[in-house]
Amino acid sequence: MAQQDLAGLASAHLRRPGLVMLTGAPGSGRSTLLRRIAAVAPGPAYAGGGLAMLAAVPALALSRAVKARLPTHDVPLLAEAVRSRVRGGLLVLDDLQYADPATLAALPHLARNVRVLVALRAPHRLAEETVAALRSAATAWLDVPALSADTATDLARRVGGQLTDEALATVVRRAGGNPLAVTALARQAGAGRGAPDTDIDQVAYAIAAALADLPRPARTALAALGLLGRPAPAALLGPGAPALLEAGLVVDGDDGCVPVSAYFAETAAGLLDAAARTDLHRALADLAPDAEAARHLAAAGDHAGAYRRALTAADRPGGDRAGLLLFACELPGVSVDPRVRIAAADALLAAGRPHPAARVLTAPGPLGVEADVLRGEALLQAGDPAGARAAVRPVPDAAGGTVVAARDRILLLAELATDPAGALDAAEKIAARYPAPPPGVAAALAAVHAAHRVPGWDTELAAAAGTGTDPLAGRWSAWLLVEHLVADGRLAQAATVARDAAQACAADLAYSWQTRFLAVRDWAEVLQGTMIAASAAAAREPAPGAAADPVAAMDAESMSPARDAADRALRRAADLTDRALPADARGYATAATALVEADTGLLAAARGRLAAPDGHPATAWVAREAAWLDGQPDRAAQPSGTTTAGLLTGLRHITARWAAYDSGATARAAYSSAFEPNTPAPEIPAGLPTAARRTLTAWATGTGFTAAADTWTGVALREEIRCLLAAGLHDTDPERAVAALLRAEHLADTAGLVVLAGRARRGLRRHHVHRDTRSPRSGSRLTRRETDVLRLVAAGEPTRRIAGQLGISAETVDTHIRAGMRKLGARTRTEAAALALTQIEASETHSDREEGR
């Protein structure tokens, strides 16, 4: 039952004399609900209640309500004194757990003649016979329900500001529908604070005061749930579990006792002193599975015991073997067996974690040739080819065949990283040495052939990445294949390979590799334009069997599918950036998210996302592209300081050409200034995809942009649009120029690329093409909500305050701003606000004239 429904039920019971009890956990909203019911009840309300510091004062709760001194020596006389003052009004008492015995004894007498509304917190220290008497006298005993997920999310969004959807979901999950916990956790998340530990803020203090009324076994059981971080059977929690169930602080679930609010359980754990916490960790270690027991023992200071339990857990299938072995190797004061170090490094490399793999193999003494090649592999993957070469050089030719093959693989790949030309010769020698190369060597040979684009390189890499190969070599080969496909502009193939590889990594719990593939998949799909296009198509498709709804159809028309598609694409790409990612994954995820934001008009958000230092070539280009979209060609033309090849090199040169055009310099001089100031313009770089090379040739000659646009079709939608824009700006034939601009506008509108669509419209206005309607996908009029949002933008209100004033989320505010920009053809939110005000004022003037007729 929702709290609103509970309020209605309580009000119904209070139409006649009787006692209505509201009970709930700390912070459940009892007092708020009490005030809400009292505000709508007929007649005057007499509000009082108990006070923790004055719980021994006789009849204090009743005296506060009626504002008079009362006889406290005789309960019937006390009840009559209160009744004579309340009469037809409503007696409201909060915090009954702090009430004195006289007040508690008078309530059953009052309930016969007066309407009484009382709130009681659970847990409490009222005697069982007192509770039984109150239950017997009550006409309704109502438990305050937890907030629904939607209501809790709205509360967290209002309190925490611009939290991401993932952060909001985490807050709601941990709070368990408790308003106090939602508020506290949302404030912590909004301020960038972590979960509570031993530092107790005011909210935690209030919770601690309530938990003090629990019996000690119940407090210990709740603290155990906080330390476990998961549900637990009642038998594990001990004798305190029934008291927690009775107090409503835990509920029975499929996996045992589940805390209603994880925040309450964590606070209970934070209240333990050091000795009690150690004892509880040891007790939990005796009852928990090995993986959990190892961490409990480590927290209790028993590192040797933690080491043994971690190794036992690592040997069981289905667990986080890499994480457990790393945990065991890094326990202080423990002598780690070299075999454990080797096993840990092997598992970490398979999971895509080369830095910790190299770390666990760093020991005072020698660990053997097998450890040498594993450390070389880890250093190679960590980007240290010189260190990798030095690590494997001591491995002799007399070592085992598998070890020698691994050594040769590392030496070949280190050569490829430092001397690509010499690597081709080295590859021929190694191929001669291994007529049937093992998987690792075959993957290294394929990498060398891919770097030099030897015919069939992609087939070789795909075979090395296929099923049945060594997992490490397979994932590494799949990653190389994806990166080379992206460099060649084969984005659709790159996205497919990355998606399949991510699924395989997920099945093997290789999180680090999985996030790399997911990030580069999103990057490829954002560049290609398929992510937004597919989302837009899904938005236009009705659900199977769905009935036609004219109202929904009107709403769908006013809410552009392209806008919704862009929002979905942004959420999917941004989801990864909120996680702990490897550098490659973070670079691609950040670049994908920022490019969607910049293209859809959220230029400030894109700038903020790109502000952090990042040497990844994708983010370096997106930073300059966002500057160009934001009308800052000087920043767009600055050297990026990164070196790369293939598609990204072409995109950087294309953006520099656009920056040159917008700054008014000649194409040649500005193109030169973007990379080597005051020097002759460089030749078009070698090794570019066909579409990029055709585009740069068009810029060099001033013709051929429309043909270049065709080469981008199916490759990168936004670059196709940019070529069409260039055609409209350079073509001397007005008819062809307008046709190119109209096509660019249509493609940009369809994909929700606000800034490029606005640029196309400005180009059309130069050719005196003014139309009264926008593309059908944009709608023809601003909705009322879009108008409200843009009016507040014009007033100078920031996004967060607009969200608060209109009662919507910050993400929804941004959505309405983008929609308005799209419909008005504006490049920035400020321009959209100005245009919207012009429309509003014109509309009001027109209305005034109509009324004056």
Image: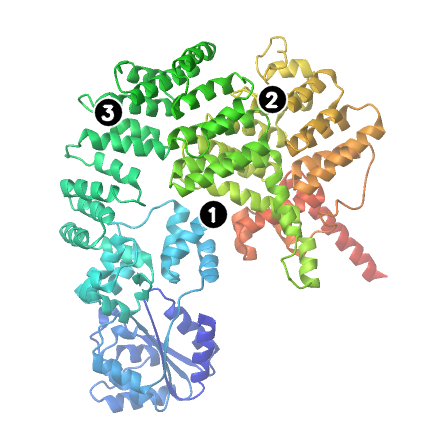
> Which residue is under mark 3?
362
Q: Position of residue 538 (x, y in %)?
A: 63, 49
Is 153 drawn above or below residue 439 in the view shown? below
Decide which of tag 1 and tag 2 comes sooner along the chain: 1
Between the C-alphas of marks 1 and 2, the distance is 34 Å
Please tell me how crowded label 2 is: few (under 14), some (14-19), or many (20+) other residues with Cα within 10 Å. many
Q: Nearer the viewer, mark 3 or mark 2?
A: 3
Cβ–Cβ under 8 Å for marks 1 and 3: no
Between the C-alphas of marks 1 and 3, the distance is 39 Å
Decide which of tag 1 and tag 3 comes sooner along the chain: 1
Please tell me how crowded label 1 is: few (under 14), some (14-19), or many (20+) other residues with Cα within 10 Å. some
Q: Position of residue 411 (x, y in %)?
A: 36, 16
Q: Quadrant of the N terminus?
A: bottom left
**In percent of the image, x 36 and y 87: which residue is there?**
85
Element type at marker 1?
loop
Element type at marker 2?
helix
Q: Is residue 354 left or right of residue 613?
A: left
Give the amino acid type for the residue marked by disc 3 in the picture.
Thr
Is 134 drawn above or below residue 329 in the view shown? below
Is 164 drawn above or below residue 349 in the view shown? below
